[in-house]
Amino acid sequence: MRGMGGASCSLRLKDLLLKYGCNPNQKPAKIFMKNNSDLPLDVLNGNPGYINLLDAFNSWQLVKELKDATGLSSAASFKHVSPAGVAVCQELSEIEKKIYFAENISLSPIASAYVRARGTDRMSSYGDFVALSDTCDETAAEFLKTEVSDGIIAPGYTGKALNILKNKRKGTYTVLKIDKNYVPDTIENKDIFGITFQQARNEVILNAKCLTSNIVTNNKALSDHAVRDLILSLITVKYTQSNSVCYSKDGQSIGIGAGQQSRIHCTRLAGDKADYWYLRQHPKVLELPFTDSIKRPDRDNIIDLYIGGDSSNLFENNAWKPFFKYKPIHLTAEEKNSWLAGLTNVALGSDAFFPFEDNIERAAGSGVKYISQPGGAMRDDAVIASCNKYDMVMSFTGIRLFHH
């Protein structure tokens, strides 16, 4: 029956009282099922907050849909009701292992998916809420133990994984078990300003057919990998605060632009994040002489500062000394541009049409080869012409994916 959870267990509740809502002054707060059925989740550890649960339910929908679409173990790292990173399981290269802090670790499929999702944008993933499409195993829990994170949602946990997670954050880490068989009602409601909004759930299926049925560019060659990456991008923006754009490559997001009022700002933000992701693999970045005692969050912040345009701050008044064994060498603009020329075959999914060709110009600067968007703008012809100039492949899906 739609809207009903699975079999209840000792921890299954009809409602869950929360410390407060979005902010401490918003009391009382709770979650419950309007049909008075049991909640479709168990709280195995911790005390989830209002925003934790918004992240949990949005991220679970994303990874479940991505696993259904690709057949691959999937993971997401969420912050403030949008993903910081999304990925499916793939074997990590030696460079990826280094920049994701996964060296000398044997990763299970679900663990590799999360390591890659977390690695998309490590600064934004600081204090994330984690979603896994599959049972959380010991290797995933061991990696997560070392990261700053608020909680996790998954369909199950091995005994060893659960013990590891229960000891995280001095025993307060939030661990949620979702009923993987739960199917919500087809109609959803939201109250705003005392007024109830009602709509049909967005249950559109995103698959290869919606990508290949209307390719509008001269280049129509979509590889299987491109299809996978475009599906990942589209499912990601489906659960990202609009406006939103997602760049992806090799089965993971590499840059997500969320909640921007202008489409070009989404494209720029996501493209800048994709560039940072790729620049983290530059030899100068990999060889930065960090002190042995530096913590991961500090290291992520310093790398971001080193790559960014304001890196001169590191080299003034000995500001580098707390972080490096010796003074590092600048990464010049010429070196950055030369390195970024190697970023290629990137896929881009947009939740709505591109109104102007400036989005294509920016996407080309971050190696985008494949684009999927709804189409339907007044300047579609100009956007298509811009794609043809760069020999891109662009499909019109006719499907808008706004999420609010």
Image: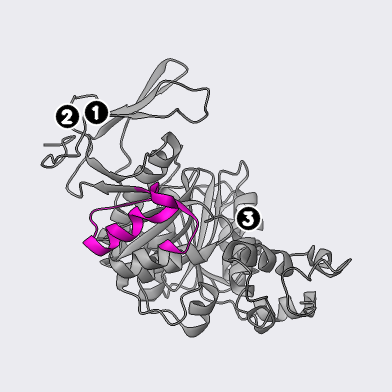
Q: Indicate yes or no whether the magenta region holds residue 248.
A: no
Magenta stretch bounds:
145-174
Q: Which mark is residue 269?
A: 3
Q: Could you tell me if residue 385 is visible in this image?
A: no
**Front in this rendered view, residue 84 or 51:** 51
Residue that appears at 41% across and 48% down: 238
What colour scheme has been applied to the protein in the rendered image? one colour
**Which of label 1 and label 3 is nearer to you?**
1
Q: Position of residue 183 (x, y in %)?
A: 20, 42
10 Å neighbourhood of mark 1: few (<14), some, or many (≥20)?
some
Q: Quadrant of the N terminus?
A: top left
Kind of residue sitting beneath label 3:
Leu
Residue that appears at 41% across and 70% down: 251
Q: Could you tell me if residue 155 is visible in this image?
A: yes
Q: Position of residue 80 (x, y in %)?
A: 50, 43
Kind of residue sitting beneath label 2:
Ser
Which residue bears the numbered disc 2?
Answer: 37
Which residue bears the numbered disc 1?
Answer: 33
Q: Position of residue 154 (x, y in %)?
A: 29, 53
Residue that appears at 35% across and 66% down: 140
Q: Are marks 2 and 1 in contact (CB under 8 Å)?
A: yes
